[in-house]
Amino acid sequence: MHKLLPALLSLLACVASLPAAEAVKPLRALMVAGGCCHDYAKQKTIISAGVAARANVEFTIIHEGSDRTNRVSIYEQPNWWRGYDVIVHNECFGMMADTNLIQNITAAHDAGVPGVFLHCSAHSYRMGATDAWRATLGLRSMSHDKNRDLTVKKVHEKHPVMMGFPAEWSNPKDELYRNEKVWPTVTALATAYSEESKKDHVVVWVNEYAKTRVFATTLGHGNETMQSAVYLDLVTRGLLWSCDKLDAKGAPRPGYGAKR
């Protein structure tokens, strides 16, 4: 027995050094919402509450503007991202084309802050002359199909973000954003078929960008999609993956799961 004692003590020391779930600080997420064409008043709560129910995440929400040209006030500030672990973009400002402002937005991700990009964020700033936003996303899209039911097909079985996502998901009343360019740093996770372009388009992906990770999906036009457990599970895994808090099996790392 005495020969096992050193090993037992070493094991106990390792266990004691593991972070207790309650001792892990929540991820600090900043969500920027606003712009045209979507129910951001409700969707900002659907996303923040849905993710917080699934993972140890606390949200700060900035909701500004109701048209395509708005300049979100926090983006005007230098180092606006300080104090946050991840930025969730859920905005629709397609006609805001100021190069300096766009580059100040993407500076957060250049500096290493992870990003989550939802639906119309992929069309935001698309009229800008700079590729800074598009390169951060890893994808350029300038148009979408008419609103209709989509069949979303998983194309990456083993990626942790896609663990638990069905092989095919029937997503009602959504918009399919057409891919015009996909950066080589992108890993496609799911696609949907366009009845208008007669092509498959990437609708869920991750991007290894600069010093950080980005998760993005063009799905989520309407509240019905965003309220779906499939969608909220996906976004939660994507957010955790972007922050390197998701294990290889698609589960939150210790301390980053749902609060009990």
Image (tube, rainbow, N blue to C red):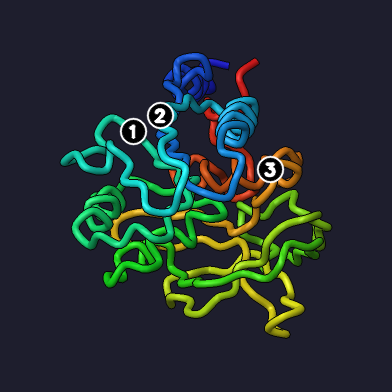
Q: Position of residue 30 (x, y in %)?
A: 40, 34
Relative to residue 196, is residue 113 drawn left or right? Answer: left
Mark 3 nearby-residue class (10 Å; few <14, some 14–19, many ≥20): some
Quadrant in which the N terminus appears? top right
Q: Which residue is mark 1?
A: 84
Q: Residue at x 50, y 28 (%)?
A: 57
Give the amino acid at mark 2.
Answer: Arg
SS at badge 2: strand
Q: Residue at x 81, y 54 (%)?
A: 172
SS at badge 3: helix
Q: Nearer the viewer, mark 2 or mark 3?
A: 3
Q: Position of residue 139 (x, y in %)?
A: 47, 70
Q: Which residue is mark 2?
A: 28
Give the amino acid at mark 3.
Answer: Met
Q: Position of residue 217 (x, y in %)?
A: 58, 57
Q: Which residue is mark 3?
A: 226
Give the amino acid at mark 1.
Answer: Tyr
